[in-house]
Amino acid sequence: MTKKPLRLTPAGLVLVPLAIACLMTAIAALAVSLNDRLTIAAPGPLITATILIYSVILVLLGTAAIANVRELATLGIADPLTRLPNRRALHEYIERKSRGDGEVALALIDLDSFKQVNDHFGHAVGDQLIEQYAQMLREVCGSEARCYRLGGDEFAAVMSGKVAGTILEGMCRTLIERLATPMEINGRQIAIGASIGLARSTADHRVPSSELLRRSDVAMSMSKRGGKMRCTWFNESFDRRRERVREIEEEIRTGIAAGEFSLAYQPLVDAESRKIVAVEALLRWDREDRQPLGPAIFVPVAEDSGLINPLGQWVLRQAVCDALRWGDITLSVNVSAAQLRNPEFPIKLGEVLEETGFPPHRLELEVTETCLVLDPLVAERTLDVIRSFGVRIALDDFGTGYASIGFLRRFRFEKLKLDRSLIELAGGDEGSRAMMLSSIALARALKMGVTAEGVETEEQAELVRLAGCDQIQGWLYFRAMPAAQIDLLIQEQADKSLKGQAA
């Protein structure tokens, strides 16, 4: 076993020699003061012994100083947890290899769902997972590529040579395949994934290490957007897309301040009576002479930028203020994944309900499966708080994801909204029709209401009506319209009801 050298702090390196020198001087002074007859017959050997002792002490302290300096130098270029080289070492290596004629390829690896591991099992388990993954990365890279930990759950691998990019991509795919098997930590099976971005620097087109890292980071983000557990090579079009996203983000921010956003409402009718029983609030953006943008484009940008929080709060407040005029009509409002992850959302919702006096039982929040699978524990806690207010929860776009019976039981939705694609296919495909019927039967067994979305023909309406849907939403009956037109429809429906009672 190798004995570790003495390690001292920088202050210790100064204070220890002074303390030893003072101690030796004090011992000599004490000896002289206690014995005035003390005579030194041979001062030479005594001086030599003193010098030798002091020299040995200096050697020991020098060894400690060298060990400290080496450790500090190692910490400057290595990650303390995994002992992998760090970001600084990565830049130095790329710059060194870029002086040659070979290709330099960089893979940026970001672990998927690592935050949930820390949240659910604690940071100690998270650290063990990081160490285990670092070992996996070493094994896959072997002696062909260098691997690094850049911080958190972010790693990197670098290769140089004629076909470096091709070989590195193969390694990355091997990593993804190995991550398909859960890692075992303290008896737990923990599943994580990885999103990987790849970029290269060639002799014909050299880029600085910082730019190479940025490009691989952009490509990694595209891997996440594309569904995770995949590799993506950087493409120049990614930068153009990011610039456009940045522009849209700034326009959203300006649009909120300028009051450019508005709400339209699409009525839902009772499947049997065909009377309006609910309305869904739909966000619209009046961009005047600029290029039109639908919610499918600007809402994801708002979510990524955090602007969905003020925008969503405005939608909620405006919608309940409009719906106060509509009697017992239910109001449906869409909620994004980002809003559910925001711990302030239930608080703001409660404030809106209290300040406006809107009856909570008339409010229905629509969430998609994606909102819930990103962080199910957080979503479940948030929905429980919302339900405690008396607000109902509906699962939107059912039939497009992978919701299981356990998933539906866990979140206890009050309503399922069948996606328009399922309704369209059920009209001419036996398998889709069977899927629609089984979905409705499942909802009934779990005591959920069922709404059919996107109904555009009488045939579709009759199909979902016979299948047992409670409500129907679609262009066959009503398109989305301003609140003022909803006022007229509700009044017209109330007048007909009064005439019917009088008759």
Image (cartoon, rainbow, N blue to C red):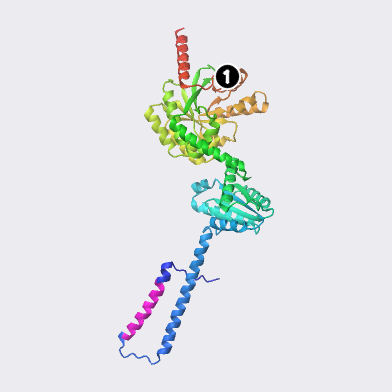
Give the image quarter of residue 93. Answer: bottom right
Callout 1: 10 Å neighbours few (<14), some, many (20+)?
some
From where the camera sits, is residue 192 visible?
no
Name the secondary structure under disc 1: loop
5 to 305, vertically: above or below? below
Quarter of the image with the N terminus is: bottom right
Q: Where is residue 491 in the image (x, y as percent from the top left)?
A: 45, 15
Is residue 421 magenta-colored?
no
Residue 166, can we see it?
yes
Q: Residue furthest top?
A: 503
Question: Depth check: 209 or 185 in front?
Answer: 209
Residue 383 picture location, percent across and down = 47, 35
Q: Residue at x 46, y 34 (%)?
A: 254
- Among all residues in the image, which is located at the extreme front? 204
Quadrant assignment, res 132: bottom right
Question: Would you name the residue on which mark 1 appears?
Answer: 476
- Which residue is more in the foreground, 173 or 357? 173
Q: Which residue lies furthest to the right in this view?
A: 162
The amino acid marked with disc number 1 is: Leu
247 up-or-down from 212: above or below: above
What is the span of residues highlighted in magenta in the rendered image? 15-32
Magenta stretch: helix, strand or loop mostly: helix
- Asked whether residue 27 is drawn in magenta, I would say yes
Query: Quadrant location of residue 296?
Result: top right
User: Is residue 472 found left or right of 316 in the rendered image?
Assistant: right
Name the spot of residue 63 as percent of width and height, x first.
49, 72
**Number of marks:** 1
Q: Position of residue 379 (x, y in %)?
A: 49, 38
